[in-house]
Amino acid sequence: MRTKLFFYSISLLTLFSACSKVIIYEPSAEEIELYSQIYMPRAERGAVSVPLSLAEQQLTFTYNAFLGGPIDARNDISVRFGVDPNKVAAYNETNNTDYQLLPEEAYELEVTHATIGAGQRTTGDFQLKIVSGPHLELFQNYLLPISILDAENSVNNMLATTYYLFSVSYEPGKVPRELVLSMGSNWGNILSNGVRGTLIRRDANNDILVYEPDEQGVFSAAPQVAGINWDASESFYYVNENTIVVRNYPYWAGLFNFRVDDDYVLHGADPFWLGDFWDQFRLIPFNDFFLTVDGGGVMRRQPALTDVNAPKTEVGSGFGGFKQLLAYDDSLLALAHDGRLWLYEMSDQAVPGPRRQVGSGWEMYQQIIVSGSDILALDGAGDVYRYKFNPNGFFPLK
């Protein structure tokens, strides 16, 4: 027993001896000067994107400056904040955007001159006030660059500016809409956009009806019957002004190509059958491509009107959790189950870019449909509403 205690004592003494050898690194004057730069911490996290409405409201954000490097400030360091309009043009050129500088009456900086006190690292937090109202333009995108204009110390120019991005749209719950079609709650089970601004409906009798819009975009005329007893069909997809593809119900889930004539009647086109088992994918016709999304949310492209087994190229991921995915001009709309509406800018090769939110509250509808530049929305009563949509705006439905 004494032998074990002696061994343990020697081991502990050895451990304490090893831990007592602490090396303290003293940075050189050159290193202190190199890393002791003034920067804005918020700039590290990228641009701040905020929707605004034309209603008079006030939002507040914080801004500050921080001293980097290994030591606290040895003396008071003066810092000057402000807005540099030249940053707007530089941002637009770098990001291929077209923002305007936020008008002066729309913002207020709590201070423009601040100090990092001796022995401190930060100026402390200050408030940036944003005031919306009639001085803003509907659907305009504004940029406000808050910068460290100068300081009594070296400034980290890569992190000297925080960019605030503002998109102007409607007040929550006050987005205008127009009732364009009332079908009743027993309207059927397929509703899709068609050629020349039409709507395609499969009614409760499984007949295919086509609604033409009038000059105001209202579907006021009685529908035309374009097909009888299409009970095997599950989905219709608009491809272009001459073409609709139709997917049948599982088990086979075949996809078929139809040409649309002047009277909206569907005729089998060549190639007619595009393969079976398309239910393994979510299908989005997009310009000259079919986009498919598998069960794991991976998006791939293939040429439009090609077979289910055609070679596919992966273009994105993370698309599995959306309620709907729809082509909108050269972009992609993604509707989440919680009602948030997102827009992805798409490349010529259908590669999704970064997304941005363009709406909220859309869960109040059963589905949405892209109709030209507008969005049609179907509610539970069988009513269809038209929204004059603008991808530059934000549409908070409630």
Image: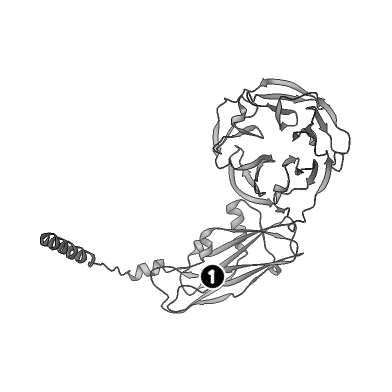
Nearer to us in this view, 1 or 14: 1
Give the image quarter of residue 67. bottom left
Placement of 197 over or under 156, stated as above or below:
above
In this rendering, does residue 304 appear at all? yes
Q: Residues within 10 Å of mark 1 (few under 14, many from 20)?
A: many
Quarter holding the C terminus is bottom right
Placement of 376 over or under 134, stated as above or below:
above
Label 1 element class: loop
Question: Residue 45's x, y, as percent?
Answer: 52, 59
**Which amino acid type is marked by label 1?**
Asn
Nearer to us in this view, 375 or 196: 375
Give the image quarter of residue 84. bottom right
Q: Residue furthest front?
A: 1
Question: Residue 101's x, y, as percent?
Answer: 66, 62
In this rendering, does residue 262 appear at all? no
Quarter holding the N terminus is bottom left
Question: Residue 62's x, y, as percent?
Answer: 58, 68
Please tell me which residue is depicted at 63% across the width and 52% down the height of the picture. 97
Q: Is residue 230 left or right of residue 165?
A: right
Please tell me which residue is depicted at 50% across the width and 64% down the height of the picture. 157
Residue that badge 1 annotates? 64
Question: Residue 73's x, y, as percent?
Answer: 42, 75
